[in-house]
Amino acid sequence: MLRDKKLVLLSHCLLNVNAKVYGLANYKGAHEELIKFLIEENFGIIQLPCPELGCEGIRRWGKVKEQLDIPFYRKYCNEIFTPLLEQIIDYHKNGYRLAALIGVNGSPSCGVSKTCSAASWGGEINDRRTTEEMMQQVNTIESPGIFIEQIRKLLEANKIYIPMLAIEEADPAASIADIKKVLRGEG
C-alpha cells in the first residue's frame, strides 16, 4: 500500500495566497518552499477553509482579533471546520499521523501563537489622519487567532491533540526551518 498515513492541516492561504487581504501576500500563489517540502516528505495536505474570505469576501479590509471576537464569527468558524473535523476523527481512529496544523502567525483568524490586536479599533474611517492614528494602535500579541482557538476547542473535545506550528506572517522564510525540523521529528 503506497501511503505514509501522515497528514498536515494548512491554513488556506498557504496553498492559496489569493485569499489574503490585499497587500499581505508574501508569495505569488502557494507557499512554494513549504508545499515542496510537504510533498517531498510524503505528507497528505488538508487545506483549512479561510473564514475571513468566507464571511467577507476578497475585498474585505484587514481586521484585528477584537473585531472578529464575536459569537457569530466563532460559530461560523465551528461550522466550516466541522466537516474537516469529522474526517480528522476518522483519520485519527484509523492510525493516521496528524503531524501538525500549520497556521499563519499575525493573522487574527489563523495565528497560532501570535495575532494582531488593537483594542480600540472600530468606527468610521473618515480621514487620513484617523487612519494613520488607528494603524499605530495595532500590536502583535501572544495569542492565537479566533479560528485556531475554535479548532483547538473542537479537537480537544474529541481528545485529538495536533501540534500547532506557524509561518511568521512578517517573515515567512524564518519559520520554515523550524517547521521542517518538527515535521521530520528532529525538534
Image (cartoon, helix red, strand yellow):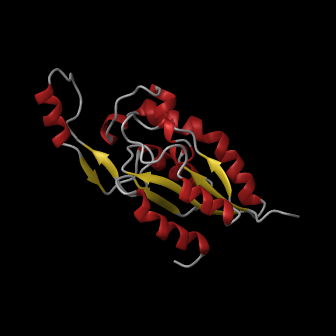
Q: Quadrant of the rendered structure where residue 79 is?
A: top right
Q: Is residue 71 left or right of residue 50?
A: left
Q: Which residue is rendered at x = 20% and y = 23% of the image?
A: 125
User: In the depicted view, which residue is nearer to us: 132 or 115?
Assistant: 132
In the displayed image of the protein, which residue is found farthest to the left? Answer: 129
User: In the depicted view, which residue is nearer to us: 17 or 85?
Assistant: 17
Vertical comparison of 149 with 70: above or below: below
In the displayed image of the protein, which residue is found farthest to the right? Answer: 1
Q: How many marks?
A: 0
Q: Which residue is rendered at x = 24% and y = 29% of the image?
A: 122
Q: Quadrant of the N terminus?
A: bottom right
Q: Which residue is rendered at x = 40% and y = 35% of the image?
A: 21
* Position of residue 97 measured from the top left corner of the image (x, y, whole percent): 69, 65
* Position of residue 11 measured from the top left corner of the image (x, y, whole percent): 53, 48
Vertical comparison of 84 with 5: above or below: above
In the displayed image of the protein, which residue is found farthest to the front? Answer: 28
Res 159 seen here: no
Res 176 seen here: yes
Q: Which residue is rendered at x = 38% and y = 43% of the image?
A: 108
* Position of residue 45 measured from the top left corner of the image (x, y, whole percent): 66, 53
Vertical comparison of 97 with 185: above or below: above
Q: Quadrant of the rendered structure where residue 63 is?
A: top left
Q: Is residue 91 left or right of residue 100?
A: right
Vertical comparison of 11 with 165: above or below: above
